[in-house]
Image (cartoon, rainbow, N blue to C red):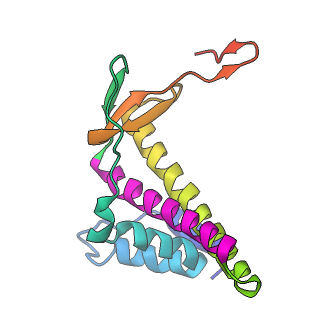
Amino acid sequence: MHFTEVIANFLRPKPKPEACPDLGRRVTMDKLKEISPQLAELIEEILSDDEGLKGFLPNQPVQAGEKVLGKAPTLSHRLWHLSEFYNREATQARVDARFAPPGEAGECITRSLKAGFKLRVIDGMFWWIVRTELNLWNTPLMLKEGWVIVEGPKPVVPWGPAPR
């Protein structure tokens, strides 16, 4: 099936769920696996419930004077856990590459790059969900302990702070 056919199938009117109870996530994931197995794998990883990742928590306390803007939605917590996990994996692979024998350094660099790209994608999804949920598109944000979102420092450029 070509990509355009898959898109056309998504755009066609959908039958009512009660008419076809099996229509739902499984069918969508099957189609996604057809057109992009890598994206389907990433989504399945995000949706899995790995208890071992819950140790990655935001640990910076809110400082006096920081403007609290809201809390990170529960849905986004899993993304934060994963982004911190891949941050650690990318960093560890870079350290491994530095001390690896010359023949093994390339494999470590590849591991670091793969983890780094996953980190950027998942981190981007985390901030997209937070910004969408809290409707905060023109504000620099930071995540603090207790899943609290605070206003971050304003970017400073040679001609002054960025306009609002």
Instruction: Point out residue 65 in the picture as x, y percentages from the top left corner.
Output: 36, 16
The residue sitting at 41% across, 73% down in the picture is 44
Q: Residue at x 40, y 53 (%)?
A: 80
Q: From the viewer's perspective, is 49 left or right of 129?
A: left
Residue 52: image location, x then y, percent: 30, 70
Rendering coords of residue 38 (x, y %)? 57, 75
Residue 21 forms part of the magenta stretch: no
Q: Residue at x 49, y 62 (%)?
A: 88
Tell me if residue 96 can be seen.
Answer: yes
> In the image, is residue 46 above or below residue 72?
below
Residue 132 percent across, percent down from the top left: 43, 38
Q: Nearer the viewer, residue 23 or 159?
A: 159
The image quadrant that residue 100 belongs to is bottom right
- Name the residue furthest left: 18
In front here: 53 or 102?
102
Asked if residue 4 can be seen in this view, the reply is no
Q: Is residue 36 left or right of residue 51?
A: right
In the image, the segment drawn in magenta is 74-99
Residue furthest to the bottom: 103
